[in-house]
């Protein structure tokens, strides 16, 4: 039988090219789901990418396709798993993890493939693929975490959901009755690297990060046991799971998550006409530079009811609250008055409307970033990276910030930033594994590149020139980020590593760009 051999840390793993190797049949016979042998042929993933449909990408290639399959073409050394196990329930996850232990395999975990840093796959591993796991969603009016003091804290409005569920499914389930901290594309998995990283959201300044809403996890440990993890039960592991990175400490098979009674959401989206870039590049640069300066000002000075994104040529923000804060609109009107009258018509207001809650705002509006059906896959030449800009740095270095955004613009880098601050900063900075610098920041400044030949190191280097030693957010981290551990986790790194090594002694869960890779 032909075989392919991979050297994985302490383990030597043999991958059969034919499915006749008895040990793999043993796993298939134990599970309700399906075991898939993975080949090195990337064509199916490349084909589905051309359709620009994130939901097809999720289900293609037996789980090996991602939003930008450049990972398996330009980054061949990262490779693909040996097998994927399409789990149907938590018992399948247990059996797969135990099988990996018995056969000295390493395990990677993938849900929907939104990991831009390739953390959901590992060369030669057994990949636990959760996208088709049985769906569980239940809303509890009150909830007391398991194995805790029965007279202890009781939570209200807790959503229980299983692993592999996407934010789109959760938004549909909650409907118009609640607001929730969720992902910006509906195909993002709610239980995977999104929450494992931090849980960035358009609602973050109002309600906090996604990790701040987690009340309890059901986790399959590296030994294949099911445990319940919360603030009173395995509290160190609960701390690490909230921000220490997805796929590192076990498999999250269920989450209990805080949702919020609905409040009005006023959606406001504005962009600079992209057509101006082609017809009058100098005027486009002038207008976008002015707009970037306006965005910096309002991100620093708006109330925490305002939250959202700033992208290279516009913004998409929400006001959450039943009483609309008009101070922002006064500032916007004042800024528009400073714009050259010949250029002002190129500032396009796409949305300016109040909705009864978040779900309604994205399902009824024209949100250019969020509720696309189908979600747009990013394509094989897409790269992304980021740096965190603290409130202190941005407040005290306005001229440097203006010059930095201008330099990125004229060098062809499209920016995409999350507004931080507000409730994100109000939390105890050591309450989760998230880098404290993120909670001190006002923007996670991202840069996007859609060219296979893009020099992301140069783009991030422009930011580093103005903001030396800047930290990096885990969500949307650059795939080739140098010294990523210190940049992502900062002063929390050593504690996260201690917890990782305590619970995963053999480093079974060893994923690219994870804490102990």
Image (tube, grey):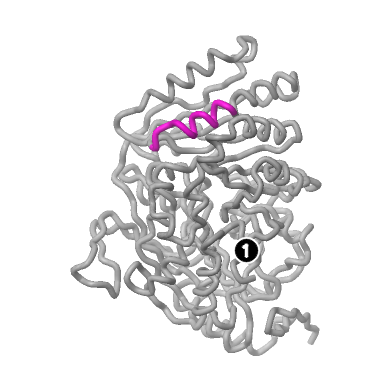
Left or right, 92 with respect to 446, comes to: left
Decide if residue 371 is in sight here: no
The magenta-colored residue range is: 293-304
Is the residue 296 above or below the residue 71 in the image?
A: above
Q: Give the class, few, some or many, for how many residues have Cα within 10 Å of label 1's Cα (few <14, many ≥20).
A: many
Q: Is residue 441 magenta?
A: no
Q: Is residue 37 above or below residue 223?
A: above
Q: Quadrant of residue 254?
A: bottom left
Position of residue 241 measured from the top left corner of the image (x, y, whole percent): 47, 66
- Residue drawn at the location 43% of the way across and 34% of the way down: 318
Provide the residue designation for mark 1: 119
The secondary structure that most of the magenta stretch takes on is helix
Please name the residue shown 54% across and 16% down the image: 336
Give the quadrant of residue 348.
top right
Residue located at (24% from left, 63% from top): 153
Q: Looking at the picture, how far across and down is residue 233, in whole percent?
A: 34, 73
Foreground residue among 205 and 11: 205
Q: Position of residue 206 (x, y in %)?
A: 38, 42
Q: Is residue 186 above or below residue 211?
A: above
| Residue 440 vertical position relative to residue 151 in the rendered view, above or below | above
């Amino acid at each position: 039988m032909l075989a392919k051999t991979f050297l994985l840390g302490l383990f030597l793993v043999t991958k059969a090219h034919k499915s006749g190797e008895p040990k793999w049949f043993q796993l298939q016979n134990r599970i309700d789901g399906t075991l898939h042998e993975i080949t090195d042929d990337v064509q199916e993933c490349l084909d589905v990418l051309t359709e620009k449909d994130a939901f097809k990408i999720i289900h293609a290639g037996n789980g090996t396709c991602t939003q930008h399959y450049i990972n398996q073409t330009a980054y061949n050394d990262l490779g693909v798993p040996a097998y994927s196990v399409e789990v149907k329930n938590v018992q399948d996850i247990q059996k797969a993890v135990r099988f990996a232990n018995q056969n000295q395999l390493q395990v990677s975990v993938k849900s929907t493939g939104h990991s831009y840093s390739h953390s959901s796959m590992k060369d030669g591993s057994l990949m636990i693929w959760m996208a088709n796991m049985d769906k569980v969603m239940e809303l509890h009016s009150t909830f007391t975490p398991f194995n805790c003091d029965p007279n202890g804290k009781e939570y209200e409005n807790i959503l229980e959901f299983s692993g592999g569920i996407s934010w789109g499914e959760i938004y549909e389930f909650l409907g118009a009755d609640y607001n929730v901290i969720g992902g910006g594309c509906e195909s993002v998995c709610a239980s995977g690297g999104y929450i494992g990283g931090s849980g960035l959201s358009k609602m973050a300044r109002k309600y906090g990060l996604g990790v701040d809403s987690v009340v309890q996890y059901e986790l399959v440990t590296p030994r294949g046991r099911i445990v319940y993890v919360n603030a009173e039960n395995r509290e160190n592991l609960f701390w690490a799971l909230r921000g220490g990175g997805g796929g590192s400490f076990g498999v999250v098979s269920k989450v209990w998550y805080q949702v919020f009674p609905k409040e009005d959401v006023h959606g406001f989206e504005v962009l600079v006409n992209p057509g101006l870039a082609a017809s009058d590049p100098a005027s486009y640069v002038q207008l976008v530079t002015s707009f970037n300066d306006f965005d910096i000002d309002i991100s620093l000075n708006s109330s925490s009811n305002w939250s959202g994104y700033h992208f290279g040529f516009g913004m998409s923000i929400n006001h959450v609250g039943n009483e609309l804060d008009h101070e922002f609109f006064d500032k916007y009107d004042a800024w528009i008055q400073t714009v050259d009258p010949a250029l002002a018509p190129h500032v396009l207001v796409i949305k300016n409307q109040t909705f009864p809650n978040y779900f309604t705002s994205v399902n009824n509006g024209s949100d250019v970033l969020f509720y696309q059906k189908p979600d747009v896959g990013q394509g094989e030449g897409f790269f992304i990276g980021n740096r965190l800009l603290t409130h202190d740095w941005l407040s005290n270095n306005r001229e440097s910030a203006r010059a930095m955004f201008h330099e990125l613009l004229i060098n062809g880098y499209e920016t995409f930033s999350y507004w931080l601050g507000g409730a994100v900063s109000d939390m105890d900075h050591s309450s989760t594994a998230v880098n404290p610098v993120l909670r001190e920041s006002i923007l996670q400044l991202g840069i996007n590149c859609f060219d296979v030949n893009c020099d992301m190191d140069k783009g991030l280097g422009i930011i580093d020139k103005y903001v030396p030693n800047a930290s990096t957010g885990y969500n949307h981290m650059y795939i080739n980020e140098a010294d990523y551990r210190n940049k992502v986790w900062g002063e929390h790194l050593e504690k996260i590593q201690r917890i990782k090594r305590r619970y995963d002694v053999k480093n079974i869960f060893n994923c690219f760009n994870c804490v102990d890779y």
